[in-house]
Image (cartoon, rainbow, N blue to C red):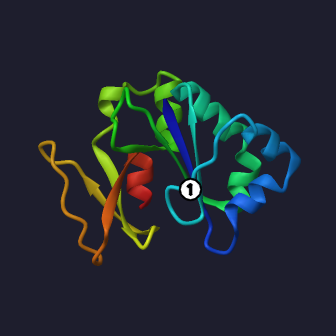
Amino acid sequence: MTRVCIVGSDDVNLRYELLSRETSRAALSTYDLDEPFFNAVAVDTVSLGAAVALLNDLNWYLVRFADRSLVCDPSIDEQEWLSRDLATKVRDGRLDPDETDEYVAIFGVVDGRLAEPMFAARVEGGLPEYDLRDVDETVVVRLTAAEYDAG
């Protein structure tokens, strides 16, 4: 199963915004909704292609109500997430899955909320420790080179 996680903007209730509108409610109706982080909605899809297609279907809402969209595909990595842009490049065959791990954003998790990201490049397979604040755990999100440069 490929997991999709949409993280809402601070000033909105993401679940409400997605479920109060007919088109997004219909797109999500076949999925069991989960909340892995505060103000986030996650679902399991059958494949990377289905995950990207769902995000594309929800794009109008994502632009207005979400800070980020993440995809976790166990065929690429069971723990690390992909940014939406990176997942799209892999799905479209523009990037090999084995070439997705160089650039990352490491998010701290504090009281169930994603904290500010620390951007890093993997060196000899390793990542630095998250050191922006004390956190309960971390979440690693793989990025495209352009996303890393913009971070």
Residue drawn at x 33%, y 43% as measured from the top left: 79
State which quadrant residue 9 falls in: bottom right
Residue 40 vertical placement versus 91 (above, below): below
Residue drawn at x 80%, y 46% as measured from the top left: 25
**Is residue 67 in sight in this rendering?**
yes
Q: Position of residue 20 (x, y in %)?
A: 83, 56
Most distant residue in the right direction: 22
What residue sits right under mark 1 in the picture?
Answer: 35
Most distant residue in the bottom direction: 133
**Is residue 144 in sight in this rendering?**
no
Residue drawn at x 29%, y 78% as measured from the top left: 133
Q: Position of residue 62 (x, y in %)?
A: 68, 53
Q: Nearer the viewer, residue 85 or 14?
A: 14
Most distant residue in the top direction: 93
Screen quadrant of the C terminus: bottom left
Residue drawn at x 38%, y 31% as measured from the top left: 74
- Inspect the image, locate mark 1, and give the three-letter code of the amino acid beneath it: Glu
Q: Taking 14 as reference, is 7 left or right?
A: left
**Element assignment for label 1:** loop
Q: Position of residue 34 (x, y in %)?
A: 58, 50
Residue 5 vertical placement versus 7 (above, below): above
Residue 7 vertical placement versus 82 (above, below): below
Q: Nearer the viewer, residue 91 or 18?
A: 18
Residue 4 vertical placement versus 120 (above, below): above
